[in-house]
Amino acid sequence: MWLGLRDGGRMPTRAEFRPAKAARFLREIVLLEVPRGIERRVMVRLVGTTVEARLQTNIVRQDYLQYLPEIHREGAWRSCRMMAEHPCGLWQMSNLRYERGISNLVEMTMFPLAGTPDGPQFVLVHLNFMGTGADSGSAPRAISADTALTFRFLDVGAGLPAWAA
């Protein structure tokens, strides 16, 4: 789906992303806004209905980084910026924990969308919920995302970025 948006360019733009082109994925996607510059936030702009039903809370217009342990926020912000600056995808497996005492193993596949030259960049995320289990304790918020259990950058034609863990 992402490759079909490219229309000859290295990275599709946010303007080229039309929900109708992603109809079969819409329920499982999240659109994140990543500001240019030094502002360290990743704003949630769109959440699919399956994702919202799993989370049981509305996270639109929230900073995604607040749902991560503080120690992992910088790395998450840097990886989002890297996807936009060095066009690449990212695949990872993570646990999401919920305040209601359950957790999900989630496969996340992410691809960048370019913004306007002076505007923010975007990351389109597809979530595949792999199962639900009991959590040993509730999350400190409605949801809490653990750091990636495993991750890989995906080459989309510009090579793989250098990543210092």
Image (cartoon, rainbow, N blue to C red):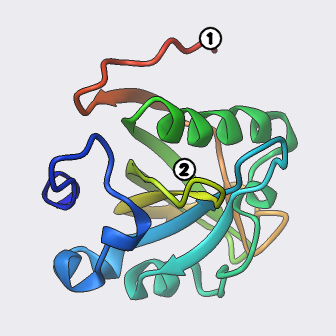
Q: Amino acid at mark 2?
A: Asn
Disc nearer the start of the sequence (2/1):
2
Helix, strand or loop for disc 2:
strand
Quarter containing the N terminus: bottom left
Residue at numbered disc 2 = 95
Task: Give percent across and percent down for residue 43.
Answer: 69, 66
Number of other residues with Cα within 10 Å of mark 1, as a class: few under 14, some 14 to 19, many 20 or more = few
At a point 21% along the width and 53% down the height, the residue shown is: 6
Which amino acid type is shown beneath numbered disc 1? Ala
Question: Residue 164, which numbered label?
Answer: 1
- Provide the secondary structure element on which disc 1 rests: loop
Whether residue 73 sits left or right of residue 112 in the image: it is right
Up-down relation of residue 56 to residue 21 (above or below)? below
Q: Residue at x 30, y 80 (%)?
A: 26
Task: State the CA–CA distance, disc 2 to disc 1.
Answer: 22 Å
The C terminus lies in quadrant = top right
Question: Is residue 130 visible in this depiction of the protein?
Answer: no
Q: Nearer the viewer, mark 2 or mark 1?
A: 1
Q: Residues within 10 Å of mark 2 (few under 14, many from 20)?
A: some
